[in-house]
Amino acid sequence: MYLGTMAQQCPDKPALICRDDVLSYAELEARSNRLAHLLRAWGLREGDGIAVVLGNEIRFAEVYWAAMRTGLYFTPINTHLAPAEMQYIADNCDAKVLVVSQTFRDLVTQFASQLPHVTHRLILDGTLEGFTSYAQAVSALPTTPVPDEREGATMLYSSGTTGRPKGVRRGLPNRHPAAAGPEILGAATRFGFTPDDRYLCVGPLYHAAPLGFSFAMHRIGATVVLMPRFEAESALAHIDRHRVTTSQWVPTHFVRMLQLPVEVRQRYALTSHRLAIHAAAPCPVDIKRQMIAWWGPIIVEYYAATEGGGTMVDTAAWLQRPGTVGRHWTHGKVWILDEAGHELPPGQPGLIYFEAPPGGRERFHYYKDTAKTASAYHDSLFTIGDIGYLAAEGYLFLTDRQSHMIISGGVNIYPAEVESTLILHPAVRDVAVIGVPDVDMGEQVKAVVELREGYDASLDLAQELIAFARDRIAHYKCPRSVDFIAQLPRSAAGKLLKHALRGT
């Protein structure tokens, strides 16, 4: 579906709802066209880049669609980064335009003048020295499309858990925006999206999944309900108030909602909710069982990355094989290889690989990093460094990231399994398991725990948590020590930032 077609056929239909703001398809079409004309007037052409420092807000959609209809690479920058990290991404992606909102002005002013590739700076609300006012710049521009519309593409940056973040880049689609490609139509078919859907976005739009799902919804003419940030009870209230039909989550969101008192959970009607998708990290089996008991058989899990690949499993298949992330979602093959590149038998963990496209624009590369790109590929396969194994009928089970694996006494220990155990203790709000140096064993297992309200850190509680784990999993996997922390470092997308815990 072309944005302009939706604006003609359903001009008043909400494209995006955020707080009390509603952006119709007609308004989104007009506003994104105005900005597209401004970008052309500033000299941007197909293949150029635009970087944004924006929160989950209405105008994010305007900027995104302006880039998508002018053939630009669109790079949203994680708003939780330090100014120096933001500067690195804005510079590395070769953006010619930087777009920011007032919320982040104090951060951006620390580096905005130090971007040699940036020729124009735009602030969406208010004014800022060195920046052009969005309202003034676009007010007199046409609301019709630019004459040379071309499909753009996103260039997202990896989380940077090892070294600096890398831009994941593919060739541009080389088509008019009206010609939606198979990657868009395939996703809509795969998950059963329809124009009647109301999709709840609870994650940050700078992250791949919230960004991709939200604007895929615009491709098919559905409505996006956008939360400025995730809050457990507010998410339930959004489903109730806006009659949400589809949504996308990470396991941390499930944990937070399950920790709400039962009377709070029962306060909201969720009858419109027909599909809840989750991904991004392994979900503890007991947590997912509780979600299924609460929400019913509407939960679909997938495993994929910005780089590509993908498996999927619905509720029924998962209940038969608890813990699986499913089978290849296009009926292809998932490969499990050892470090030498040899295929491993079922049940034996190794690096997860997917078939790479034969070449051309579909094959990703890490921008300006040929060595990292080469390390991701093995002949016609690619990996993102996750470890897993295959069970019967090709069902994939994840163990952990290769970079997170703990080797203690020569034995591989996967932190995700230990975390999935400890999160079930009533005192634990959140937990991370890391390896710390050990003279005899090389590494030993440490748990870093964020406590729920009403519990106090103590040596007795640390020993209780260790005993809790030892009652449930092999003793060699269990933590030898427990540290308590006020709040674990997580990205807004729900991923643990374990590199920030090293040395805890």
Image (cartoon, grey):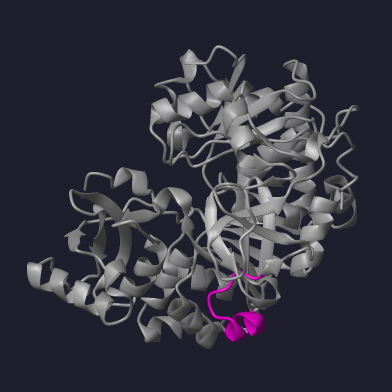
User: Residue 480 at x, y = what percent?
Assistant: 19, 64
Task: Judge from the rendering whether residue 438 lies leftward or rightward of residue 126; answer left or right.
Answer: left
Task: Judge from the rendering whether residue 475 lies leftward or rightward of residue 229; answer left or right.
Answer: left
* The quadrant where residue 310 appears: bottom right
Magenta span covers which residues?
Answer: 315-326
Q: Is residue 296 above or below residue 205?
A: below
Between residue 166 and residue 408, name the one nearer to us: 408
| Residue 75 visible at all | no
Q: Which residue is depicted at the point 70% across and 47% down?
A: 381
User: Residue 166 at x, y = what percent?
Assistant: 55, 33
Between residue 118 and residue 407, name the one nearer to us: 407
Q: Is residue 60 above or below residue 200?
A: above
Give the farthest residue toward the left. Answer: 459
Q: Is residue 50 above or below residue 385?
A: above
User: Residue 6 at x, y = what percent?
Assistant: 85, 53
Q: Which residue is depicted at the point 50% across and 78% down?
A: 288
Q: Which residue is depicted at the point 76% across and 37% down?
A: 68
| Residue 206 visible at all | yes
